[in-house]
Structures are given as structure tokens and as C-alpha cells.
């Protein structure tokens, strides 16, 4: 179609207006607030009137925790773990160690109803030692691992198709001299005490903190069979009398921070792994290995003037982003925030009262804007707001009564 110059000039303003209309920027919609989530609370059933695992709703927008309701009666569920969310699964499984100082101690599997929060017991197996205190589940949902504090053992389990645990697949007795020797404080280190079994982010290795022997040990995981193979080297020896309790992996996967219960310190360790590749000849490649190197740069979790003998450090955690690390102190009864430097070094930025007594465990909500702190000996959970920019905490903004809280787990 031919367009004359006059016709073009007549049409130009309309066309320009049309173009402007087309290219006007769209107004961004405000994202909806995160929906309420559910949190499970493990309690010490040997104290007070608590009966097992409780659940409550948590509002990530306001930071308000609802009234805890009994979800399942079970004996001293001191540590909880959740099966990974997989497509096709109607329900997830929740696992609880029953932390009693008896060789017949157990690990219980519950079916979790996502609509009501109810827990239905569907399996129970031996923990393979007295005083189970930690359970971890790999991200594939094929294997689980338990540490037995008083029994001095660790055990591995296959997770069966219905979510229940098999009988123990492997068991290692830490009284074996290859796992080291008792530390210098007989009152707490009269025997070996595995305190945590932590799975590496790639699901290939298990790292065990032994409070009694002042050492960390590393195992290779077979994800299909749940069998464990000692790595080479097996042990990383820590300072005598430090009492390694729990670890936290940095999001970069290369730094590990071990919180030490007895001398109230945090150690920074370097984590290195080898990768295996199929050999052209078809030969079986060597097993991958994981190695820990202590940088020997411990930092105190307690104030300089607080007596070490009156405190036991408890929990350590790093939120997404990896700029900050948090720890709890039982005795000083504080939460401590550290910034993490370019080389992984820690700098204390805040020390704040936990709002109760004996902060055994704390956890971030899914948004990492809030911390829930379980104060075991003051029958309450306190809620703190976390500033993602500065790393500092504000609060407690709420104190919720619950008897002898030992662990909190968001779903």
C-alpha cells in the first residue's frame, strides 16, 4: 500500500502514541506474604509435664508462634529429622530419637499428616546404643544415621519404601582405640561420646563429633546400602578438653565450624574432598575421600570475663547467604552472632540474652528472618527477629510457654 508524505505525517502522532502505550513499564506486583508454616518441638519427657512431640503454627510475616499442641506421645524426643519432600509422596516421615540412657533406646518413625500436623507412629527400631542424641537423613531419603551419646556408638539405617527405618545396617563402637582416647576431663570425658552425625552437602560423607575423645571422624556413605566406610585419614584430633558437639557447614561447602561444648569455643575447619572418575580400562576407581584440616583459630562463644566452667556451648548454625554464624551458650544463657570474613574467620558482632535458661537448640524459620530458641530449663521458646543486612538479633519479641523444649524443626 502506497502512503503519501502527507498521509504519513497525519498517521505519525497516533503511531507514536500507540508505541508509547505498548512500551509503558508494567507495575510490579507486590509478592504475597509467606504463608504460615508448621514447627515441631521435641521435649524432655523426664521433666515437667511434657509428653512428647508438639506442633504449632508460625507466621513468617509477624514472627508469631502459635500455642503448641501435642502431636504425638513419645519418650524424650531430643532430636528430630524429616524425610525429604519427593513428588508422589502423599505424606512425609518424621524421625525422633528417644534419648534415654539405656541400651534398649529406640528411634521412632512417624507419618506426618501435612493438613492437620498430626503424627502417627508407624515404626520403631533400636538405636544401637544408649542415649541417642542426633539423627540425620540424606537428601535422597535413602539413608539415616544416629549418634548414641552414652552408648559410644553410631549406626546407619536404610529408609524403606514406607518411610520406616530398617534395623541397623552398620554400627561403629567408638571405644575402639582407632577412634582416639578419652579427653582430660573425667567428669565429662570418662568415655567416648559421639554427639552428632552430620551428612556432607553432597551426601557422600558422614562427619561425627566425639565429645569424649576430642575428635572428628569421617566416613564414606554408600547411599544405596547405607553402609559406612572409614575415610583416610579417619580422625581429625581437636584440642584436648574442647568437647566437639555439633558442626555447621558454610554454604560454600568448603568451611566447617565445630562448636565445642566443654571449652565454649568454635573451631574453623577446611573441608576437602576427592572426586572419582571411571577408568578407561573399566577398573573400579578408588573411593572418594574427605579430609578435615583445623585452621587452629578458635574463638570463644562466651564473654571474656565469664567462667568457662559455668558454661556449655550448645548449638551452631549459619543462615543462607553465609555472611553470619550464630551460637548458643548454656550457663551464660546467650545467643551470639558472628560475621564471617573472606577467609572464614569469625568476628563477634553481638551477644544477647536468650530470654530464658539453657538454650539447648535454636533454629531459623524458612525465611531466615526469625530465630526460635528453645530454653530447656525455663519452659519456653523465645522468638528473635534477625536483620539479614547486619546479622544482629532483636528480641525476644515473643515468649511462648512449652515445657522442657529440646529441639525445634520447621516443616
Image (cartoon, rainbow, N blue to C red):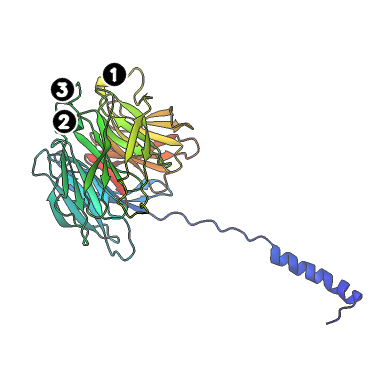
Q: Is residue 374 above or below residue 282?
A: above
Viewer-proximal residue, 53 or 132? 132
Q: Specify the label residue 186 is tagged with.
A: 3
Could you tell me which secondary element the residue under label 3 belongs to? loop
Q: Position of residue 42 (x, y in %)?
A: 23, 45
Residue 48 in view of the camera: no
Q: Position of residue 36 (x, y in %)?
A: 38, 54
Q: Residues within 10 Å of mark 1 (few under 14, many from 20)?
A: few
Q: Quadrant of residue 234?
A: top left
Marked residue nearer the N-terminal end (3 or 1): 3
Quickly name the residue at label 1.
307
Could you tell me which secondary element the residue under label 2 belongs to? helix
Q: Residues within 10 Å of mark 3 (few under 14, many from 20)?
A: few
Q: Quadrant of residue 213?
A: top left
Q: Is residue 347 above or below residue 10?
A: above
Q: Specify the label residue 177 is tagged with.
A: 2
> Residue farthest to the bottom?
1
Q: Residue at x 20, y 32 (%)?
A: 179
Could you tell me which secondary element the residue under label 1 belongs to? loop
Q: Position of residue 65 (x, y in %)?
A: 34, 47
The quadrant the N terminus occupies is bottom right
Q: Residues within 10 Å of mark 2 (few under 14, many from 20)?
A: few
Q: Position of residue 158 (x, y in %)?
A: 20, 54
Amino acid at each position: 500500500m502506497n502512503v503519501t508524505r502527507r498521509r504519513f505525517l497525519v498517521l505519525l502522532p497516533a503511531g507514536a502514541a500507540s508505541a508509547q502505550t505498548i512500551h509503558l513499564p508494567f507495575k510490579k506486583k507486590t509478592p504475597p506474604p509467606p504463608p504460615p508454616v508448621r514447627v515441631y518441638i521435641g521435649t524432655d519427657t523426664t521433666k515437667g509435664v511434657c509428653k512428647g512431640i508438639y506442633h504449632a503454627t508460625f507466621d513468617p510475616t509477624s514472627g508469631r508462634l502459635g500455642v503448641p499442641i501435642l502431636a504425638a506421645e513419645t519418650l524424650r524426643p531430643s532430636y528430630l529429622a524429616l524425610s525429604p519432600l519427593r513428588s508422589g509422596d502423599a505424606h512425609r516421615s518424621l524421625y525422633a530419637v528417644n534419648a534415654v540412657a539405656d541400651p534398649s533406646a529406640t528411634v521412632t518413625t512417624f507419618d506426618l499428616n501435612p493438613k492437620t500436623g498430626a503424627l502417627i507412629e508407624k515404626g520403631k527400631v533400636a538405636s544401637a546404643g544408649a542415649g541417642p542424641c542426633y539423627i540425620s537423613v540424606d537428601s535422597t531419603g535413602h539413608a539415616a544415621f544416629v549418634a548414641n551419646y552414652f552408648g559410644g556408638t553410631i549406626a546407619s539405617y536404610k529408609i524403606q519404601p514406607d518411610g520406616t527405618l530398617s534395623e541397623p545396617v552398620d554400627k561403629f563402637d567408638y571405644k575402639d582405640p582407632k577412634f582416639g582416647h578419652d579427653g582430660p576431663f573425667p567428669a565429662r570425658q570418662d568415655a567416648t561420646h559421639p554427639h552428632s552425625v552430620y551428612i556432607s552437602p553432597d551426601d557422600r560423607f558422614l562427619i561425627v563429633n566425639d565429645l569424649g575423645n576430642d575428635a572428628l571422624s569421617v566416613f564414606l556413605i554408600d547411599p544405596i546400602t547405607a553402609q559406612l566406610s572409614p575415610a583416610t585419614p579417619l580422625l581429625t584430633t581437636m584440642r584436648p578438653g574442647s568437647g566437639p558437639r555439633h558442626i555447621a557447614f558454610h554454604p560454600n561447602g568448603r568451611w566447617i565450624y565445630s562448636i565445642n561444648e566443654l571449652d565454649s569455643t568454635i573451631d574453623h575447619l577446611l573441608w576437602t574432598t576427592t572426586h572419582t572418575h571411571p577408568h578407561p580400562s573399566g577398573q573400579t576407581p578408588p573411593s572418594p575421600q574427605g579430609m578435615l584440616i583445623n585452621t587452629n583459630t578458635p574463638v570463644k562463644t562466651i564473654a571474656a570475663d565469664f567462667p568457662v566452667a559455668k558454661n556449655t556451648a550448645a548449638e551452631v548454625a549459619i543462615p543462607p547467604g553465609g555472611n553470619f554464624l550464630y551460637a548458643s551458650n548454656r550457663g551464660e544463657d546467650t545467643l551470639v552472632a558472628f560475621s564471617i570474613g573472606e577467609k572464614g574467620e569469625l568476628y563477634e558482632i553481638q551477644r544477647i540474652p536468650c530470654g530464658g535458661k539453657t538454650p539447648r537448640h535454636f533454629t531459623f524459620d524458612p525465611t531466615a528472618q526469625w530465630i526460635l530458641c528453645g530454653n530447656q530449663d525455663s519452659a519456653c521458646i523465645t522468638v528473635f527477629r534477625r536483620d539479614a543486612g547486619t546479622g544482629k538479633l532483636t528480641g525476644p519479641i515473643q515468649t511462648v510457654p512449652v515445657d522442657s523444649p529440646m529441639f525445634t524443626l520447621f516443616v
